[in-house]
Image (tube, rainbow, N blue to C red):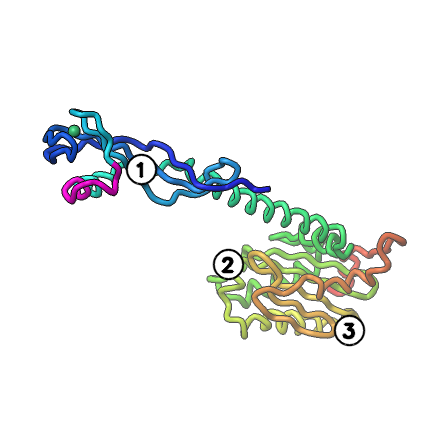
Amino acid sequence: MIIFGTRSSTLGTIAIKGTPCSHCGDNGSKRITVFGKYFHVFWIPTFPFGKSSVMECTHCLKTIAQRDYTTEQRIQYQNAKGSIKTPIWHWAGLLLIAALIAFSIIAGTFASASTTTKETDPRAQLLTADMNKLATHPTLQSDSISYAIKQMIDNKIVSEMKPEEFKYFSHIQDNKLILLIKIRKLKKVDKEYRPEFIEMIEEYFDSKPSLDTIETYIGLHGKYNMMVIKNPTALYNSRFVSDRHLYDFYGDKSLYGTTEKESIPSDTIKAIE
Ligand SMILES: [Zn+2]
């Protein structure tokens, strides 16, 4: 059983003057007590709905109900009652409900986020690990492909794009190559022109006979997420491109958790120079 209804509490008093009392005719001051009405559920104030009042004559001490105010008393009351504010606790129930809803949404988000993590493709972590290796200054020794691509991009890209801030990482394993580039201002490049980065990179790869038969996975990361991905089967170009289009670089999903992949550090590719 839910107990609900309306209650009221005293909000304050207003003094009015110069109107005759309907009982004793006295013109002296009258005191109006203002009540705030609110709806309650189990006596918890839920929301307010208006005010009521009662007037007391300070001379004869009779109380006069609001419906019996004279026109002038009603006007004085209407003018003064705005200064009597409804306290926030009259909204306590609704605020509580809003807080509970907000809490359940946040809790739900966290719960689903943790579920997602559990179900995440194991290759997502490998990509994240590789993204963490992005470097502004790849060296010929540590990452020769990134080093060469950076040289080329620095020469071809206009300075407004701040090519000196681009970050690179590349890796070769199982006859597959992944190249990740983080370009913070990628969004500033018109969408139709973004794949030109890919074309430029592929031209470079095509010029290297040692990369002839290799499968390439190229990911261009904007400020927050992948925006262009080219894998052996398709090109993706959008404000948000899912990382999963790069996962095949790491092999089949079923490989993980069973066998360790053998990987070749990308410096072995130095031979191509
Ligand atoms: Zn009176």
For marks 2 and 1, give the one nearer the viewer.
1
* Amino acid type, label 3: Asp
Left or right: 171, with 11 as reference point:
right
The earlier-in-sequence mark between 2 and 1 is 1
**Residue bearing mark 1:** 85
**Dominant secondary structure of the magenta stretch?**
helix
- Could you say which is closer to the camera, residue 62 or residue 120? 62
Whether 59 is drawn above or below 132: the answer is: above
Q: What residue is rendered at 65% in x and 47% in y? A: 110
**Residue bearing mark 3:** 212
Q: Separation of disc 2 and disc 1 at Cα?
A: 57 Å
Q: Residues within 10 Å of mark 3 (few under 14, many from 20)?
A: few
- Could you say which is closer to the camera, residue 8 or residue 124? 8
Stretch in magenta: 65-75
Determine if the C-beta at disc 1 is less than 8 A from ligand 1.
no
| Residue 11 in the image, given as x and y percentages of width and height | 32, 33
Q: Are marks 2 and 1 in contact (CB under 8 Å)?
A: no
Left or right: 189, with 50 as reference point:
right
* Amino acid type, label 1: Lys
For marks 1 and 3, give the one nearer the viewer.
1
| Residue 156 in the image, given as x and y percentages of width and height | 55, 68
Q: What residue is rendered at 23% in x and 35% in y? A: 64
